Amino acid sequence: DGVAFPETKDQVAELVEFCYEHDIILIPYGGGTSVAGHINPFESDEPILTLSLGRMTRLIDLDEESQIATFGAGTPGPLVESQLRSRGYTLGHFPQSFELSTIGGWVASRSSGQQSLRYGRIEQMFAGGSVETPKGRMDIQTIPASAGGPDVREIFMGSEGRMGVISEVKVRVTPLAEQEDFYVIFFPSWTQAKEAARYMVQSKVQLSMLRLSNAVETTTQLALAGHPGQISMLEKYLSFKGAAEGKCMMTLGITGLPEQCRPAHKLMKSMIRRYHGVYTGNFLGKKWADKRFKMPYLREALWEKGYVVDTLETATDWDNVDNLLNKIEDNLRNSLSAENEKVHVFTHLSHFYGQGCSIYTTYVYRAGESCEQALERWKHMKSSTSEIIVNNRGAISHQHGVGKDHAPFLPKEKGELGMHLIKTAFAAMDEKGLLNPGTLIEDDRVKSLFD
């Protein structure tokens, strides 16, 4: 019913107070890149105000001694980096949505960037800031670590606009690296590739980024690369080296001082040899870096050809990766078999931890005869696969957040008492339930897509 464009945190506070006085539903809006329905308005008898943070895009302060930068919450990725780089620093947070998503949105949805092995997820970067709540301003001070009870900073991270509107964000920044290179390695099989990745991560090799494509994604990526003559030569070389049909592509980054990068590179090459990896240098890595934010734009081209592309992502422990990955892919691949329709499915592991990793699956299917048919097909695939994820030790989301689309599946992950704790915290700040209802926790006022 209305859109507001505050320019200061005091104006954000004024708008939150206004909405509470007049029983107006408030939805914070950052870059609008959500793929899980965080910011979608809904049919309501109550008025709805979208609060856009698009005019709060400034680097407010940079404490170079503590390496903490303060930004307006609406600052998009490119402006975060350009303002820091002019001072010799980087945040190092590069999600796929980097070009359009905002620093406040990253905190609100617990985002993860492509180079999280070096810089961490947003929870390692977020140092404090200001949140405008119906109870007043919550200032989270920047303390490096505390044993003073539950971490308030953690409570607001991932709250997705349910406890207040993030107006300022303080983040831990890093001096710009002197050297950064990306490399591509091919492995003869998925098992060898996955074990190599696990070995390097658990050995704490100083990598900044790691991505591992399964065989179908590897084939798909090579087909999309263009330059068929060069790809044909690459295929022959890989086949000669023992990485033929079923091969899997690993892309990794090494970032830092030259004195750090040289030994990390040497150790990486030594480790991949144990698993018969074929090292191809940094040429393909440069190509990946040049196109790292381009993939989402292919959605429009596929729509024009009558195809829908979507993604599902989760995270699980190492001992469960193959089990969960196979169940996700099998369900998606066979989900439209009753309509005699095929679904193209492929997966990569996108973020790595000693304990486990994320699983990021893409699926492509024919839209059908109408938008309604395309939506019904999506709803069936999305809901059935989400059930598989939460019933097989997977997080409902590793990096996209919960929003409204994933809200029905969150109780399985958190448990009854966990959900009670979250609801109680939200109600403590927003007793009227006016802040982004239906997001993260289901609300009777908001009809689920899966009803």
Image (cartoon, rainbow, N blue to C red):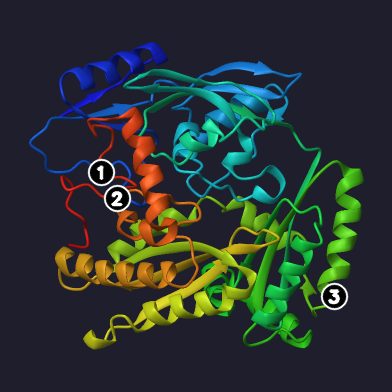
Q: Residue 334, image x and y in percent?
A: 35, 84
Name which residue type carries label 3.
Arg
Q: Residue at x 18, y 26 (%)?
A: 24
Whether the residues at callouts 1 and 2 have beta carbons within 8 Å, the answer is yes
- Check if mark 2's residue and mark 3's residue have beta carbons within 8 Å: no
Q: How many marks?
A: 3
The image quarter in which residue 248 lies: bottom right
* Front label number (1 vs 3): 1
Kindly identify which residue carries mark 1: 40
Answer few, some or many: residues within 10 Å of disc 2's Cα (few below 14, many 20 plus, some between 14 and 19): many
Point 36% across, 51% down: residue: 35
Mark 2 to mark 3 CA distance (whole Å): 45 Å
Residue tagged 2? 404
Give the camera-side residue of 276 and 130: 130
* Marking on residue 273: 3
Which residue type does callout 2 highlight? Answer: Lys
Secondary structure type for disc 1: loop
Tell me the quarter of the image containing the C terminus. Answer: bottom left
Label located before the other in sequence (1 or 2): 1
Q: Where residue 143 sits: x, y (%)?
A: 66, 25
Q: Is residue 425 left or right of residue 322?
A: left
Select label 1 or label 2 by which is in front.
2
Numbered disc 3: secondary structure: helix
Q: CA distance from mark 1 to mark 2?
A: 8 Å
Q: Is residue 208 above or below residue 316?
A: above
Q: Earlier in the sequence, mark 1 or mark 3?
A: 1
Q: In the picture provided, is 154 more to the left or to the right than 279?
A: left
